[in-house]
Amino acid sequence: MAVTGQAIIALLPELIALGFAILVLLVGVFFERSVGLVAGLAAVGALAVFGSAAGLLAAGFSGEFFGGGYVVDNFALYFKLIVSGSAFFAVLAAARWSWGTGDAPEYLTLILSVVLGSILLVSMRDLFGIFLAIELATIPSYAMVAFDRRRRESAEGGMKYLITGVVASSVLLYGIVLIYGVSGSAELPAVAETFSGNLTPVALLGLVLLLSGFAFKVSAAPFHFWTPDAYQGAPTSAAAFLSVAPKAATFAVLLRILLEGMPEATPTWTAVMAFLAILTMFVGNLAALRQRNVRRMLAYSSVAHSGYILAAFAALQGQGVERAVEAVLIYSAAYAVMNMGAFLVIDLVGEDGKSFNGLFRSRPALAASMGVFMASLVGIPPFSGFWGKAWIIFSGAESGSVLVYVVVGALVVNSVLSVPYYFGIIRNMFFEKPAMDAVEPSGGGALKFSVYVLALLTALFFLLIVPISAIAGGSGLG
Amino acid sequence: MITTVTIFIPLLGAIVMLLLPEEERILRYAALGIAAVPLLLTLYVYFAFGSDLGAAALTQDFTWIQSLDMGYRVGLDGLGFGMFFLTALLTLIAVVASFDVRENLKQYFAILFVAEVGMLGVFASEDLILFYIFFEITLIPMYLLVGIWGDENRRQAAIKFFVYTFLGSTVMLAGFLAFGILAGTYAMESLTAGGGLGRTAQIAVAAPILFGLLVKVPAVPLHGWLLDVYVSSPISTNVVLSGILPKLGTYGLIKVAIPLLPEGVQPFLPYLAAFGAINIIYGAFVAFLQPDLKALVAYSSIGTLGFILLGAASGNAVGLNGAVLQQVTHGLYSALLFVLVGVIATRTGTRKIRELGGLAARMPWAGGLLALGAMAAMGLPGLAVFVSEFMSIMGGYDAFPVQGILAALGIVLSAMYLLYMLARVVFGPIERPAYETIEDAGPMEMAAAVPLAVLLVLFGVFPALLISVQRPGVEAVLSAIGGS
């Protein structure tokens, strides 16, 4: 297991993330007052990770390292792009806010640590490695949620997130250990041999525990209850980032485990996924309908969107596998741009639904951007959310399974169901008069820049679909 | 290429509008200029390619996703050209008629232009998914136009509009997706005559598509959203809302449902014709009961949409030609009536028919044009609507005699309420002393109304101007359904 030059190149994104995480912390200690320098460094760090992953992707770099436990392929590199790209916007959005806390370098370092864990995660092909990478991404995120010491909800949300997160991790670890026990190895190819033919009860239990652990991590119902409190309490940039980047990475590695580690057990886990998908969509949307607080509404909305992605997992069968992998890739990016954008607007406007009243008259560009995010979250073309959902529907249709048709039907019903709460915001912004006592929350130029760029990406997302499906085609999965 | 440019020029225009300074004169002139471009381009297409719309200069075929055979495919044909032209024309008229919009003018025009992109796109789409995308692009702009600039009742109206039509179009999308997945392509050209689907599959696919399209029209039991929306909208939105938007539904019938799923639609055709007859008769009766002039025009407008349904269902050359033509003539007359309602309402301060009267004495132009529009609506010979309604009825009677006779009856009914309306509003004694001093339509208002009136007369006398262009398109539909 020698560390070759190739392995160093393969680890370039991770090394850059690690380096910048340390650098930001150190520079922060010595230059306590230079906002621009520290935040700029963190942003450059995120961009450098993005650039290195993009470079590897463009160069067609791929291979297995460290005895096959670490793999670089198009699929992994693509998710590294999503993670580091959203980290860039999170840093921009957090720059000014984090300065108010007095601990900006620490906060920015936490973001880069989550990046490190997440990009490591998508390359792991060993169950224990996967567990470690998940923890590496999750532990800093507990701190991010609880970071806003000026608000009690932040500590409360962080605490709930921590406790449920630890339980989830134990469940996940237990599942991994059981699988390791029956297959004698934690590497996915070896696991695949165990998960062929009839499953032993222990293997089945391991699978169920593993999937439950993942369901916790991606906030799938009925394991979603930490989500609203954590996201409502968390600083906006943390909620925006955590609902997008580590989640996409977790979905990615789950896809790898299922396709590489248990291809023979497809009927079992697609059934579980179909069940989880339907439940999660309905729970998320029905709960979101009742929310008045935009932050909480978006938290439940993120639960619903986990359900939509799980629908693609249910379609990983029959002729639908290739398209379903494509759908997960497309949806992850589509969701990243629209959901980050929607969360970030909260920092510019406020978290009460009423604070959006009359935004069209006072700040038309911001209102238009939020309108784009909301319409996209519903799934109205030509915005990004539409393409994500369309690909899930295509894959469902190609899967040829009646159960998946039901899941796709539920997805369509849920899209209609979600109209009232997303369009409630649009109605407030465009049709209502501005509230008299509306305070103007402050937001930096970098935050506004992020919102506008994300709105543009959401609107022009269709231009990215062909490149993404090319990456999916060469992903090696499916 | 010309088609693509025409579709997306308004998008550019929307961006330009947002960058302009907040000054009313500049904004109005700029909007006029922008709206004129697509119209001029369509006129150019008419004169340069009128006899050969399939020309390479007009079509574009770019396969976007190979594995799904989905792409950016646009082109003009006989079925769509008339509506393409009408969309460009009515958007310009809407800009001219925007005298009742005073707040946030630049956003108003920008949103109107985005809606225009969607509408133009629908009438040029040659791919099912593209058709759906353009179809949906109109949704949010119309929702905003009604919800921001409408009257007191606008929120309710906008939300109703959105919920109904979004539900309808989602169901339609489900049908489209199923169709494309079963046939392995979304290109309308390869889907002609069923794209290889059997009869049962065609019926299963056609049902949701028809439902979605009929909500958009709206066909009568599905019209719950209509009245509030039409009545609450500003006048210039009405021009587009009544002139173009229903045609997204009827055009979908003629361009997508009928030729692509001939066997699937076939069992529904008698009902479609019946929906047409019901629209005509229901619209006439309910229009008769409206105390509000605008509501009367709204019901008159959905009533005469019935002729399109009837003609489309007929499946013969006369009926289909009538239906395609009626799409255009209906847009001309209903836009004209809405503009004049706006003129009368701003002058007199009321839309109540009971409170109006004797306007002809003080407003000869507005009153006269209203009379012309009303006569067009009742299908008086010499005006364009007569030709298209007559053809629709002839074709419809041929295929479905009962529905055809009922539709013809509807013409009599519509004559009754329209003449009653004219007698009350335009003629008779001057109802109120205040009306002694009101002025006739001003130059802007005349500029909005007169072109529509001129075209109604022109196409009434020379219907061949449009029919000659649309004939190849209708023949293509006929060959797809195996009729004559």
Image: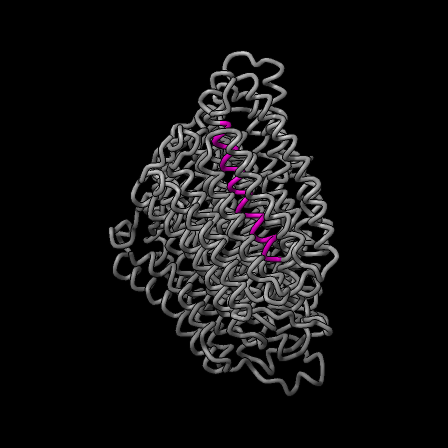
**Looking at the picture, does residue B248 appear above or below residue A41?**
above
Left or right: B462, with A248 as reference point: left
Q: Work out whether residue A463 can be spotted.
A: yes
- Residue at x 65%, y 52% (from the top left corner): A145
The residue nearer to you, when weighing B340 against B100, is: B100
**Looking at the picture, does residue B439 appear above or below residue B115?**
below
- Residue at x 33%, y 53% (from the top left corner): B469
The picture places residue A340, in percent across and down from the top left corner, at 55, 54
The picture places residue B133, in percent across and down from the top left corner, at 46, 49
The picture places residue A179, in percent across and down from the top left corner, at 56, 21
The picture places residue B256, in percent across and down from the top left corner, at 44, 42
Left or right: A214, with A149 as reference point: left
Left or right: B471, with A327 as reference point: left
Colouring rule applied to residues: one colour
- Residue at x 46%, y 61% (from the top left corner): A41
What is the magenta range?
A236-258
Q: Is residue B440 magenta?
A: no
The overriding secondary structure of the stretch rendered in magenta is helix
Q: Is residue A254 magenta?
A: yes
Quadrant into which the C terminus of chain A falls:
top left
What is the count of numbered marks?
0
The residue nearer to you, when weighing A86 against B228, is: A86
**To which quarter of the image does residue B343 belong?**
bottom right
Q: Work out whether residue B148 can be spotted.
A: no
Left or right: B128, with B417 as reference point: left
The residue nearer to you, when weighing A134 against B156, is: A134
Quadrant into which the N terminus of chain A falls:
top left
**Looking at the picture, does residue A177 appear above or below residue A6?**
above
**To which quarter of the image does residue B36 belong?**
bottom left
The residue nearer to you, when weighing A174 against A379, is: A174
